[in-house]
Image (cartoon, rainbow, N blue to C red):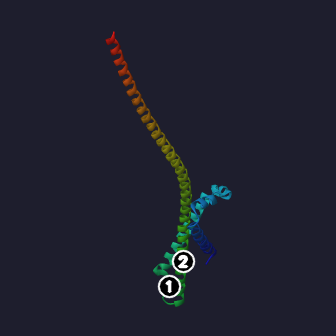
């Protein structure tokens, strides 16, 4: 394996390890957000998109080179020359195997590079949504307690109003009785004169 394909293979292994680490279920998105907010990431963030797109371009070039190599050794021309010599036939198949291996390595590296960026983005979005959810939950709890307090105050006011109405009706009845008795006394006084 040449140096470039060895580097791509190690890059693929590092991506697999990093994606597995990012997908560990007992590490919450909130903790990943804390890790992503370290100062070193803030320092590297201006270069992150450039690095990401540079790696995409390098992996696409290597992928296309591997596709070209596979097509080169898959056609009938290399095997036509190997018809007389079995060693050449084995050599062509070895080259085809290496080209296919390089195609898979570069293809999976490209795929996992895109997946890793998406996973990191989703982890950040989930952490932000959880923080917003906590804030909204606190606001909702405050609104519920305020609504319960208003409902209790409303019940107390209704009870006080009912008590006051009962007291007023009792007072009105007494006043009416007094007015009646006074009217009777006035009538009796007028008749007695």
The picture places residue 190, in percent across and down from the top left corner, at: 33, 12
The picture places residue 146, in percent across and down from the top left corner, at: 51, 43
Quarter placement of the C terminus: top left
* Mark 2, secondary structure of its residue: helix
Vertical position of residue 74 compared to residue 121: above or below? below
Quarter placement of the N terminus: bottom right
Please identify the quarter of the rendering in which residue 59 is found.
Answer: bottom right
- For the point 46% across and 81% down, the residue is 76
In the foreground, 161 or 146: 161
In the foreground, 29 or 80: 29
Vertical position of residue 7 compared to residue 95: above or below? above
Provide the residue designation for mark 1: 81
The picture places residue 99, in percent across and down from the top left corner, at: 54, 77
Residue 190 is left or right of residue 163, and the answer is left
Q: Residue furthest front?
A: 192
- For the point 55% across and 79% down, the residue is 98
Residue 116 is left or right of residue 191, and the answer is right
Provide the residue designation for mark 2: 101
Q: Nearer the viewer, mark 2 or mark 1?
A: 2
Circle 2 Cα neighbour tier, 10 Å, few/some/many (<14 / 14–19 / ≥20): some
Please identify the quarter of the rendering in which residue 117 is found.
Answer: bottom right
Circle 1 Cα neighbour tier, 10 Å, few/some/many (<14 / 14–19 / ≥20): few
The picture places residue 11, in percent across and down from the top left corner, at: 61, 70
């Amino acid at each position: 394996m040449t140096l470039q394909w060895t580097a791509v293979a190690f890059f693929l292994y590092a991506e697999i390890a990093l994606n597995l680490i990012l997908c560990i279920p007992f590490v919450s998105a909130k903790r990943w957000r804390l890790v992503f907010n370290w100062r070193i990431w803030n320092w590297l963030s201006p270069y992150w998109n450039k690095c990401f797109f540079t790696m995409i371009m390098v992996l696409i070039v290597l992928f296309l080179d591997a596709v070209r190599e596979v097509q080169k050794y898959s056609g009938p021309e290399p095997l036509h020359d190997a018809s007389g010599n079995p060693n050449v036939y084995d050599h062509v198949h070895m080259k085809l195997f290496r080209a296919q291996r390089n195609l898979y390595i570069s293809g999976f590296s490209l795929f996992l590079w895109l997946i890793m960026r998406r996973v990191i983005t989703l982890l950040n979005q989930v952490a932000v949504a959880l923080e917003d959810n906590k804030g909204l939950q606190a606001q909702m709890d405050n609104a519920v307690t305020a609504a319960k307090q208003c409902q209790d105050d409303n019940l107390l006011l209704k009870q006080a109003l009912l008590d006051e109405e009962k007291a007023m009706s009792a007072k009105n009845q007494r006043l009416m009785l007094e007015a009646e008795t006074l009217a009777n006394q006035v009538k009796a006084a007028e008749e007695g004169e």
